Amino acid sequence: MDDYVIEMLGITKVFPGIVANDGIDLRLRRGEVHALLGENGAGKSTLMSVLFGLYQPEAGIIKKNGKVVQIKNPNDATALNIGMVHQHFKLVDVFTVLDNIILGVEPVRNGFLYKKEARRKVLELSEKYGLRVDPDAKIEDISVGMQQRVEILKMLYRENEILIFDEPTAVLTPQEIKELMATMRSFTAEGKSILFITHKLAEIMEVADRCTVLRKGKHVGTVNVKETTKEELSRMMVGREVSFTVEKGRFRPGGVELDVRHLTVPSKLHKNNAVKDVSFQVRAGEIVCIAGIDGNGQTELTHALTGLDSQSQGTITLGGVDISKARIRERSRLGMSHIPEDRHKHGLVLSFTLMENLVLQRYWEPQFQNNGFINKNAVRAYSDKLIRQYDIRSGQGSDTIARSMSGGNQQKAIVAREIDKNPRLLVAIQPTRGLDVGAIEYIHKQLVAQRDAGRAVLLVSFELDEVMSLADRILVMYNGEIVGEFDPRKVTVEELGLYMAGAKRMDIRNIGKENKA
């Protein structure tokens, strides 16, 4: 008899206009890593939110160790030793890292908050599992990758037995992902059980014991990972064959569209500069990719380029126009599009409808106005067109509130809005984060199409496979500086890794010239 620690039987969850989970069965064995796979909007996060008590199902039961349990809220889940690392972080921006980790289980002594022991435990956990964080930093001041680490540490701190990981590797580096995979195996060796939502088939093949596939809210099947292939899993997930290679035409660069000279950006976390005297160019008809380990100045660099933050020194020129002090709207009007790192903080107004978000960068244009008022019919027609073109799945179409959409479909909406502006420069930071293989394939094609149409693309990615597949030129960033420039056809992943880790660097005078290394 199978030793099931969790059984979800006949789970049905309905939202306005959509059945997110339709009679789904899921069984988790003690001491296994059980992957949950499906397209964006297939119902994976919804199912896990039901298990964690964030949603109440319309039908179905949950059993723990063979007994029916009621999980009405996350406190009930915590009492049952169920923990969850959320895809969309559940963090308080103005609190410190330490305060977020201990929130809800604060150590108290004689009626007073006592953090000394909690700090020691957090530092030990972060060191043990390679999830190093600054416990005193505020959440609003740290990168998305660091915020992900905080979410994982929250669960480790609570010593949960059943661990739900919802896209935990989306913003981790390859080395950090390997460490997390090893950590998962150590958890299961201790008798813990893991539910692992991911879109990365290679991770499933590496770490999972079994995999349950969902499609459009229904249970497609559960397979033993050792008895299947990535190709079969992708077919189960999207219902068709998926190409894992990026097809690009010949590289034909044109004139310089983005010219960055001696850019320096101060850090919000310490007295040193986050970006230090950085210079580079992006030409029309090429994809330049900035590679590097998260936290080495990429976020601050892209914030300065797009106008979210200001630089202390240097110039930024777009299409021959100095935009160093230009406002965000002016940069947009001059032809810059931006797919941000944090889709909730900088990409969407979550309380707005999908329609309103899709026209957010263009509502002032004549085609969307009528005597000074927004022409809602024109906006709706435009929104409906993008929804069809980019396969944005939403329960109520253009009227769907952005907050209610799956993370992957929120990302598709941003990509649709920014690419449809026909920009001269597209700045894309982690554009495929949290997307399924079908959506990744589509967005990769869109980025290549922008390049082939003669537009400049600046891509920031922590996925080395994505970097090697898409880039025409690779710039490696380490400790706020560009330490190397490479032709992806002539460099190996191992060589890039040495530069990303700071073990090697080029003479800065050679960066921007043909790499002869």
Image (cartoon, grey):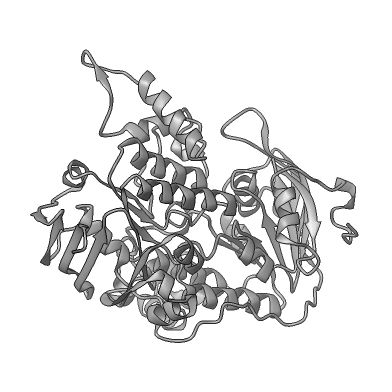
Residue 57 in percent (x, y) is at 14, 63
Picture residue at 37% right of the left edge, 54% below the top: 165
Asked if residue 96 can be seen in this view, the reply is: no
Residue 66 in the figure: left or right of residue 430: left
| Quadrant in the picture for the C terminus | bottom right
Picture residue at 63% right of the left edge, 77% below the top: 246
Asked if residue 20 can be seen in this view, the reply is: yes
Rendering quarter of residue 256: bottom right
The residue positioned farthest toward the bottom in the image shown: 240
Rendering quarter of residue 391: bottom left
Residue 123 in the figure: left or right of residue 393: right
Residue 392 in percent (x, y) is at 40, 75
Picture residue at 41% right of the left edge, 75% below the top: 227
| Quadrant in the picture for the N terminus | bottom left
Residue 174, above or below 414: above
Residue 141, above or below 426: above
Residue 214 in percent (x, y) is at 31, 74
Residue 399 in percent (x, y) is at 30, 72
